[in-house]
Image (tube, helix red, strand yellow):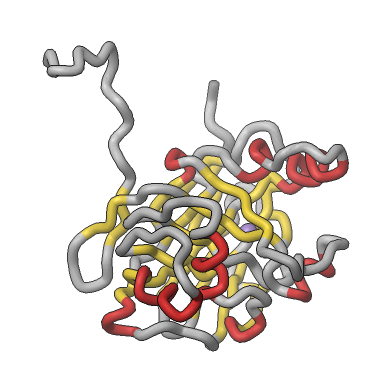
Amino acid sequence: MTTALDLLFEPDATPTLEVEGGGRVPVSRIFCVGRNYEAHAAEMGTQVDREAPFWFTKSLHAIVESGSSVAYPPGTGDYHHEIELVVVLGHGGFQVPLDKAQELIFGYAAGLDMTRRDLQLASRAKGRPWDTGKDFEESAVIGKVAPAARIGHPARGRICLSVNGVVKQDADLDHLAWKVPELIANLSTLYRLRPGDLIMTGTPAGVGPVVVGDRLEGEVNGVGAVSLSVSAAAEA
Ligand code: MN
């Protein structure tokens, strides 16, 4: 097929997320917050950043639908789970005031910020970017999106994750150090936010490694569930 742009190969399709009740949301960008629960920051030997949230990003190739089986990723021996509340924007905005931030939100989902912890910590130790530890294929697992019009804006509720039926992470959304409107307001001073932008809001304590054969099941109470199975590393 020849296109008007005369593209030499087909670009990747835009990833989309299923919405509870129908329709799909196209994903624009994936913003992630580091160190947003006190107890998790402590287990990582750090502290919550008080001056401003700490941001990193994942590329669109990170998106994978909840319920998938993903291959153990290359380049790591310490592949970790991080259960998170995911915010899905339905409207754009720039320099959004705190009291208007919630108006940008389309809905919420449960998500997993899968992490190559060994690579992340090696980068951190050298003062280098976290990209190889955080931004890799199938590292952002996202559950069904629950519209805010139906569930409201959850400020509290259990957030938990089990591996093979054993609870590993168990906390409450009210432990988020930077609250969702604060995250949106801050991010909108740095980027012109777009509909379809995602914010992964950080993980509570209890992160740890997963291995081939593991089954991960997470839930954010009042929002939804997310699951993932880890299969053998892919052949070259
Ligand atoms: Mn995270």
In the image shown, does 14 or 162 lie closer to the viewer?
Answer: 14
Q: Position of residue 226 (x, y in %)?
A: 45, 66
At horizontal 36% and vertical 54% (from top left) the residue drawn is 194
Q: Quadrant of residue 215?
A: bottom right
At horizontal 41% and vertical 55% (from top left) the residue drawn is 193
Image quarter in which the N terminus is found: top left
**203 relative to 62 in the view: left or right:** right
At horizontal 27% and vertical 11% (from top left) the residue drawn is 8
**24 relative to 187 in the view: left or right:** left
At horizontal 37% and vertical 70% (from top left) the residue drawn is 105
Q: Is residue 235 above or below residue 77?
A: above
- Image region (quadrant) for ligand 1: bottom right
In the image shown, does 122 or 236 lie closer to the viewer?
Answer: 122
Q: Position of residue 230 (x, y in %)?
A: 55, 49
Q: Quadrant of residue 178?
A: bottom right
Q: Position of residue 19 (x, y in %)?
A: 27, 66
**209 relative to 16 in the view: left or right:** right
